[in-house]
């Protein structure tokens, strides 16, 4: 219902002033090119002939109802799933079917809807481990880098707390920190803002600004529409594994197919 209300009420001025600064993207070769990708699980077609190009420096959103195929798509990009058909290319290299650790080393990192930290390690240690294994840093350098990244995601006060003792929203910030620790060129963000209260959203948008200032391109799945509308230049909407709309946040929110997808 939140999505339906937004679809109907958003005007030209609906993208607010605190959002992530828009960048003028110089179109050249895409940093990521997804071409006619299909993914099946038995008789279920999770993705059907889906294509998307993402350019360096861009922030792209993925929207769609629950079960639309959004997380499946980023799982294909990050190596969790191999596409049954189609091509996934990162910086011109075909990565479809590469295992996740090789995809990570190429410069792609992701977060998960359900965070997966080492519960017995502190927030600082979890982030440092990601820097060590994602970038090959030595321990001392990785610890210093982890300190810097925890500052970026606004978790310096939790640095010495075991991940198993952190509350859900803090774990999502830690999940973002661990992804950033591998120094990605492309970051896949899966519902990190879920559960944020209205007063917490501006700070999260500030974090995304800092991520972009690091030169990171990102694709974001998000159901918190205020975050989505202010954090990306372009949105692709998926329903039933197929693309039903693509354009600016304002354009897709006015699209009748998008409204029907959310209203049912």
Image (cartoon, rainbow, N blue to C red):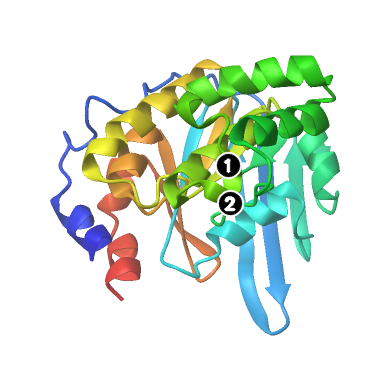
In this view, the residue farthest toward the bottom is 43
Seen at 62% across and 70% down, the residue is 46
Q: Which class describes the residues within 10 Å of circle 1: few (<14), some (14-19), or many (20+)?
A: many
Determine whether, in the image, residue 217 is placed left or right of residue 264. Answer: right
Q: Are marks 1 and 2 in contact (CB under 8 Å)?
A: yes
- Residue 249 to residue 151: above or below: below
Q: Quadrant of residue 93?
A: top right
- Quarter of the image for the C terminus: give it: bottom left
Which one is in front, 71 or 58?
71
Q: Position of residue 64 (x, y in %)?
A: 42, 61
* Among numbered discs 1 and 2, the one appearing first in the sequence: 2
- Residue 185 to residue 45: above or below: above
Q: Secondary structure at mark 1?
A: helix
Q: Label 2 belongs to which residue? A: 115
Q: Secondary structure at mark 2?
A: loop
Q: Position of residue 231 (x, y in %)?
A: 38, 34
- Residue 103 to residue 207: above or below: below
Q: Which class describes the residues within 10 Å of circle 2: few (<14), some (14-19), or many (20+)?
A: some
Does residue 30 appear in this view? Answer: no
Determine whether, in the image, residue 48 is placed left or right of residue 6. Answer: right
Which one is in front, 164 or 249?
164
Q: Position of residue 241 (x, y in %)?
A: 55, 67
**How far apart, in angstroms, are the residues tagged by discs 1 and 2?**
6 Å
Q: Label 1 belongs to which residue? A: 175
- Residue 196 to residue 54: above or below: below
Q: How many marks?
A: 2
Does residue 142 appear in this view? Answer: yes
Determine whether, in the image, residue 37 is placed left or right of residue 255. Answer: right
């Amino acid at each position: 219902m939140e999505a339906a209300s937004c679809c109907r009420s958003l005007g030209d001025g609906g993208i607010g002033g605190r959002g992530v600064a828009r960048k003028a993207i110089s179109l050249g070769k895409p940093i990521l090119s997804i071409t006619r990708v299909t993914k099946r699980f038995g008789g279920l077609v999770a993705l059907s002939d889906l294509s998307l190009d993402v350019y360096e420096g861009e922030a792209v959103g993925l929207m769609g109802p629950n079960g639309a195929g959004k997380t499946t798509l980023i799982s294909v990009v990050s190596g969790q799933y191999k596409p049954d058909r189609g091509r996934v290319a990162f910086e011109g290299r075909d990565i479809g079917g590469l295992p996740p650790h090789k995809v990570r080393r190429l410069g792609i990192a992701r977060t998960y809807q359900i965070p997966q930290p080492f519960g017995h390690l502190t927030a600082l240690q979890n982030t440092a481990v990601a820097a060590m294994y994602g970038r090959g840093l030595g321990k001392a350098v990785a610890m210093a880098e982890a300190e810097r990244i925890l500052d970026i995601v606004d978790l310096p006060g939790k640095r010495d707390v075991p991940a198993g003792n952190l509350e859900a929203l803090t774990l999502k910030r830690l999940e973002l920190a661990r992804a950033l620790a591998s120094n990605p060129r492309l970051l896949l963000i899966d519902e990190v803002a879920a559960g944020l209260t209205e007063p917490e959203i501006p700070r999260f948008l500030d974090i995304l600004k800092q991520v972009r200032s690091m030169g990171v391109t990102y694709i974001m799945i998000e159901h918190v529409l205020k975050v989505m509308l202010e954090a990306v230049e372009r949105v692709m909407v998926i329903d039933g594994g197929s693309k039903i709309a693509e354009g600016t946040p304002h354009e897709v929110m006015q699209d009748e197919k998008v409204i029907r997808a959310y209203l049912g």
